[in-house]
Amino acid sequence: MNGSAFHSLEEALTDEHYPEVDLALRRGRHVGRDDGTMYEYLVDAQALLETFYRRFGCELIQRSDGYFYLLPSGDRLGRRQLSAGEMVVGQTLALLYLDPATLQHGGVVGREALLQRLSALLGIDVLVRTLDPRRMRRGKFDERIASEALRTKVSEALRRLAELGFVDALNDTQLRLRPALMRFAEPVRGLDDRSAALERLVRAGEVVLDGGEQEPEDDAGTDEAPEP
Amino acid sequence: MATPPSSDPSRVIAALARDQVNVDLKTVDLCFLTGLYLRADRASLASFEEEVLVDLFEQVCDVVEPGAENPRKRATHAIQRLREQRMLARVDGVGIVRAGDYALTTLAAAVVQYFLTDEALTRESLTLLTGTLNAQLADILTAARKATDEASWRNKVSGPLRVTVSELVSGIERRQRGLDAQQEELQAEIAKLLQSDWFSAVDRCQSVLDTTTSTLDELNEILLRDTHLFIALLQEIQELATAAENPDAEETIQRVIEHVDRIAAWGSARQQAWSEYYQYVHRFLRDVVRLDPDRALSQRLRDQLAGWPVARFSLVAAHAPSIRLLRALEARVERPPVAQPRTDREADPAWVEPENVHADIEALVIRAIADGAATLAEVSSRVLAGLPESLHYAAAGRVADVVGRLARVHAEHERPWAAVLSRMEVEDWAIDRRDAP
């Protein structure tokens, strides 16, 4: 790569970083500055790869916060929408990312701090309804057992968010927050009305709207396979 | 270096655990010790009379716990407590004859120094320390070149290395820890500044970041340059010690080398950690604070989350399944069915002699009675004598049956046991000969 832009698509595709970056992007990973040479490669090859990926029916998006991701705009590449649990955990992490207190530890937060923030922001009832709707449908629940189940659900959501490049799991107790978390704040970033911002994001294919109080069968998100 | 050669960490820890060593100091104790330390420092006192201790404790008590009852008694307890904690030592040795003299221990001095001294590594202190260390090592090298016997190695090389050089290196390390603590405070301060002033704090944060970065760069540069020099000098002394076959000096030098390596490693590790922190904060200031000067985003995001159960949306991400790796082609192997070898367990019939022992019994009984046997025992003895011994027991019952059927028998109320051959007895009957067959 030698720190300079590529002259042709062939050159970009034969670069040693291409296979790793391509696989990561197609699996939904957000590649950021923390990814080092992968990010540098994308910056260098951006112009060539944008047209390349457009042929697969998807857009290579770069955000000013310092990350790239692939957004499917057609049906050629599979897509998935994040589950309700991932969305709630993601938004809370974005809030922690914006908190100056997180700066003190260089963007590292504990899982306990996340759980406390989640509980303070949403309350146990909403959390159970969002993360573990089956338990809610069964009626009255034991708070202790529900808390244990919530921890498990939050861990699952974190694992998926880590796969998508929103956080790095440093160990069993600590997470490093990544700039891609700002995607969760996208509907409220501008000065315009939130509904209008959401409409714009829906049109762009960035988000899909859920049916309000509708409760999904499980918390695994929704996958759409590509057309054969 | 600070560790004596004989001290094995496991043994030291085991000994501390065995003695149940602990330090438990309350605020009033710490203030009391600090007061003693400062008074000793100003008045150049080596020890304190008990009365002075009590007076000072009362003064400290007035500040820390105003209105506390019976301060004199409390002072006595505090002195006793601090002696048990190895903070105060009695130095007069007259026991209970009169009030004693007390001195602060090294432990107490170290604890107080920690709270009093603000020793962080600075360019000035580091340059001074490394310059002195350099001169000391050069002197030791000269002494090592001239050392001819064990005593000169011990007094002019190992001794100064253990004491002077170790103290200097420890001084650098102590100040490094001081700088670590300072940086931690600085990070908390940056967070606090942004928390309170947000956008207005950007320039101050930037300035703090830049100052610390340049300080660390300078310190690391000095450390890299000077530690390289120290190591070269120490290795030269070590080579001389090896040539002089002085293992004690070699070991001492090795420890100093390791210590110097440690302070050099500190420099690069801290610079790396600070660089990561710097980049993170810098990005935060640029991407978050500057773009959201009113700090409205956090509130809007909080509102979005609060309204979540009603207005939900989901982010979309690419999700290409993993490439399927097909297994390599293999020829299908026919597995033989599970089976067991067949064997013909049917044996061919064979001709044997006919067995009619039991049928013969009746004839033998008739003959015995006819021959004059008058009791069951006599009949049994005569019949069983002609049969194989293995059949005697079963045949005895049949004999009794035949006798009972074919002859009239009489039994006494208490039937007597009568011997049959050598190994059997039967309850005997008398046979009435009138009805004999």
Image: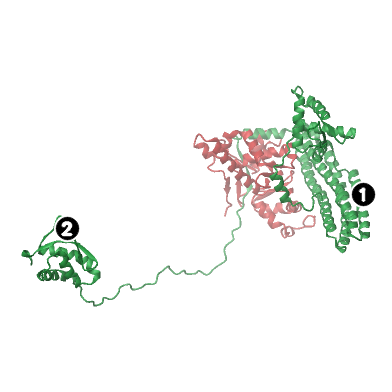
Chain colours: A red, B green
Which residue is label 1 attached to? B131
The circle drawn on residue B61 is none
Instruction: Please report contact status of discs 1 and 2: CB closer than 8 Å, yes or no.
Output: no
- Extreme residue toward the front, this view: B97
Residue in front for this viewpoint, B71 or B67 = B71
Mark nearest the camera among 1 and 2 is 2
In the picture shown, does residue B416 fall above or below B297?
below
State the residue position of label 2.
B415
Q: Is residue B433 visible?
A: yes
Residue drawn at 20 percent across, 75 percent down: B354
Disc 1/disc 2 C-alpha distance (Å): 127 Å
Relative to B245, A222 lies left or right: left
In this picture, residue B394 sits left or right of residue A143: left
Residue at figure coordinates x 75%, y 23% from the top left: B70
Which chain letter goes with mark 2?
A: B
Amino acid type at circle 1 is Gly
Regarding residue A61, the answer to whether it shows in the image is no
A148, B69: nearer the viewer: B69
Nearer-the-camera pick, B406 or B334: B406
Q: Residues within 10 Å of mark 1 (few under 14, many from 20)?
A: few
Tag 1 subunit: B
Percent across and percent down for residue B4 are: 80, 51
Question: From what the image shows, is residue B245 above or below residue A30?
Answer: below
Residue B300, image x and y in percent?
A: 68, 33
Give the residue furthest to the bottom. Answer: B351
